[in-house]
Image (spheres, rainbow, N blue to C red):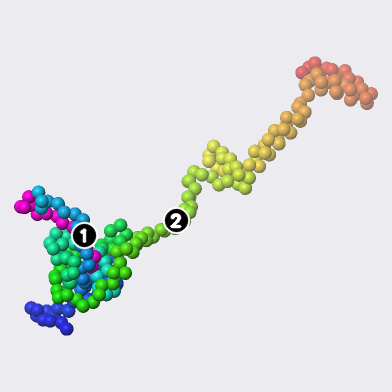
C-alpha cells in the first residue's frame, strides 16, 4: 500500500532475493544475513584519533537463494557483523575484476533488523561468477578508392592511351599508321639525279632507233 506524506503518495519498497541480482543494475532492496566480514583496507585512524580513518571490508551476505560479497565502507563496517540481519535499501551492483559486488552509496541505507529465520544458501555465491564485457565488433567492408581526376582510363592491353600536347586523347593506331607510312617512304625510290635521267632517256631512245643528241643537248642546257 502507498502512504501519503505531504500530499504525495509513497510506494512501498519492493524487496528482491539475492539470486535476482544482475551486473549493471541498481535500486535493490534486500533483507540478508551477514555470514562473514574481512577487512581489506584500514588507514588513518591509528595515526591520529582526530583524523577520519578509511575502512573497507568485504562482507559475505545472503538469503535462502544465494550469497554475494558486500563492499562495506567506513561506518557500514560496524553494521556488518557476522550473524546480524540487515536491511539494505537502494543498493547497486559494482563490478570488480569481472565479479559482482553489492554496494550502497550515499543514496542508499543500511540498518540492522530482527534476526531472520531463513537459512543462508552458501552454495550459490554470485561473486564467484566471472563475467566478460561483450564488445561489439563492426565488420569492416572494403572501401573503394575513386580514381584521381588526372588519371586516364586504361585500355584492355594495360597501357593508357597517348595524349597530344593539347591534352586530347589520341588512339594508339595513329602512331602505328604513321610509323608504317614512314617505313614505306623510307624504302620508296627517290627522284633520279639529272645524269642518271639522261642516261636512261638515251637508253630508251637507242632502243627505238632514235637520235640521242637532243637528249645530250637538253642535259647540257640545264
* Residue 195 found in image quarter: top right
Q: Check the picture and name the quadrant holding the C terminus.
A: top right
Q: Position of residue 93 (x, y in %)?
A: 25, 65
Residue at left offset 21%, top offset 71%: 33
Residue 23 got which mark?
none
Give the CA distance from mark 1 to mark 2: 49 Å
Q: Of residues 15 and 182, which is closer to you in this image?
A: 15
Residue sticking out furthest to the right: 209
Asked if residue 107 shows in the view, the reply is: no
Does the magenta segment cover residue 10?
no
Q: Of residues 80 and 99, which is closer to you in this image?
A: 80
Q: Where is residue 25 in the image (x, y as percent from the top left)?
A: 26, 67
Residue sticking out furthest to the left: 50
Contact, CB < 8 Å: mark 1 with mark 2?
no
Closer to the eye: label 1 or 2? 1
Q: How crowded is mark 1: few (under 14 residues within 10 Å), some or many (20 or more)?
A: some
* Residue 129 found in image quarter: bottom left
Q: What element carries label 2?
A: loop
Q: How crowded is mark 2: few (under 14 residues within 10 Å), some or many (20 or more)?
A: few
Residue at left offset 83%, top offset 17%: 217
Does the magenta segment cover residue 58?
yes
The stretch of residues the image draws in magenta is 48-61
Q: Of residues 215 and 35, which is closer to you in this image?
A: 35
Residue 38 got which mark?
1
> Residue under circle 2?
140
Q: What element carries label 1?
A: strand
* Residue 75 found in image quarter: bottom left
Asked if residue 184 shows in the view, the reply is: yes
Residue at left offset 65%, top offset 40%: 174
Amino acid at each position: 500500500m502507498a502512504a501519503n506524506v505531504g500530499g504525495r503518495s509513497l510506494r512501498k519498497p519492493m524487496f528482491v532475493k539475492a539470486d535476482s541480482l544482475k551486473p549493471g543494475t541498481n535500486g535493490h532492496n534486500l533483507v540478508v544475513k551477514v555470514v562473514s566480514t574481512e577487512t581489506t583496507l584500514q588507514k588513518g585512524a591509528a595515526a591520529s584519533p582526530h583524523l577520519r580513518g578509511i575502512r573497507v571490508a568485504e562482507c559475505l551476505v545472503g538469503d535462502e537463494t544465494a550469497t554475494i560479497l558486500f563492499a562495506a565502507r567506513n561506518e557500514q563496517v560496524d553494521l556488518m557483523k557476522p550473524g546480524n540481519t540487515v536491511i539494505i535499501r537502494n543498493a547497486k551492483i559494482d563490478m570488480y575484476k569481472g565479479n559482482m559486488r553489492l554496494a550502497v552509496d550515499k543514496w542508499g541505507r543500511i540498518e540492522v533488523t530482527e534476526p531472520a529465520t531463513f537459512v543462508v544458501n552458501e552454495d550459490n555465491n554470485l561473486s564467484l561468477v566471472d563475467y566478460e564485457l561483450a564488445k561489439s565488433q563492426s565488420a569492416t567492408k572494403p572501401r573503394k578508392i575513386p580514381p584521381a581526376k588526372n588519371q586516364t582510363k586504361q585500355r584492355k592491353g594495360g597501357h593508357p592511351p597517348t595524349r597530344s600536347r593539347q591534352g586530347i586523347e589520341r588512339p594508339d593506331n595513329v602512331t602505328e599508321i604513321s610509323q608504317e607510312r614512314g617505313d614505306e617512304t623510307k624504302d620508296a625510290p627517290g627522284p633520279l639525279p639529272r645524269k642518271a635521267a639522261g642516261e636512261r632517256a638515251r637508253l630508251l631512245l637507242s632502243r627505238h632507233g632514235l637520235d640521242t643528241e637532243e637528249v645530250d643537248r637538253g642535259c647540257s642546257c640545264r
